[in-house]
């Protein structure tokens, strides 16, 4: 009985670490989906007036603080 309860508790904890919470930033439309183990950012950021393009777009993925993918241009 204790093993089953421990297994259920570990499953709930793991599930809580994987559920993302969206965070809308006020930089032009960037949305970050943050969980305890990873972060996915859909970037739509306004650049300064001197920049070639008026905004940056792309996706950034970090797992345990290590950047795995970034195509923000």
Image (cartoon, rainbow, N blue to C red):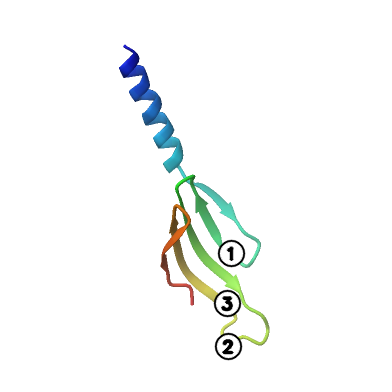
- Residue, disc 2: 52
Q: Residues within 10 Å of mark 3 (few under 14, many from 20)?
A: some
Residue 7 % position (x, y): 33, 24
| Quadrant (top left, top right, bottom left, bottom right) of the N terminus | top left
Q: Which mark is residue 55?
A: 3
Question: Closer to the N terminus: mark 3 or mark 1?
Answer: 1
Question: Looking at the image, which residue is at 36% across and 18% down?
Answer: 5
Q: Is residue 24 above or below residue 6?
A: below
Question: Looking at the image, which residue is at 54% across and 58% down?
Answer: 31
Question: Looking at the image, which residue is at 34% across and 14% down?
Answer: 2
3D distance between C-alphas at marks 3 and 1: 10 Å
Question: Looking at the image, which residue is at 48% across and 73% down?
Answer: 72
- Residue, disc 1: 29
Q: Tag count in the figure?
A: 3
Res. 56 image quadrant: bottom right
Question: SS class of the residue under badge 2?
Answer: loop
Question: SS class of the residue under badge 3?
Answer: strand
Question: Closer to the N terminus: mark 1 or mark 2?
Answer: 1
Residue 4 % position (x, y): 31, 18
Q: Is residue 36 above or below residue 70?
A: above
**Residue at the extreme top of the image, as rendered:** 1
Q: Is residue 56 above or below residue 30?
A: below
Residue 58 % position (x, y): 47, 70
Question: SS class of the residue under badge 1?
Answer: loop
Residue 21 % position (x, y): 52, 46
3D distance between C-alphas at marks 1 and 2: 19 Å
């Amino acid at each position: 009985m204790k093993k089953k309860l421990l297994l259920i508790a570990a499953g709930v904890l793991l599930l809580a670490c994987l559920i993302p919470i969206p965070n809308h930033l006020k930089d032009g439309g960037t949305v970050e989906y943050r969980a305890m183990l990873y972060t996915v950012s859909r970037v739509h950021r306004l650049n300064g007036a001197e920049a070639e393009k008026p905004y940056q777009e792309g996706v950034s993925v970090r797992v345990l603080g290590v950047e795995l993918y970034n195509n923000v241009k």
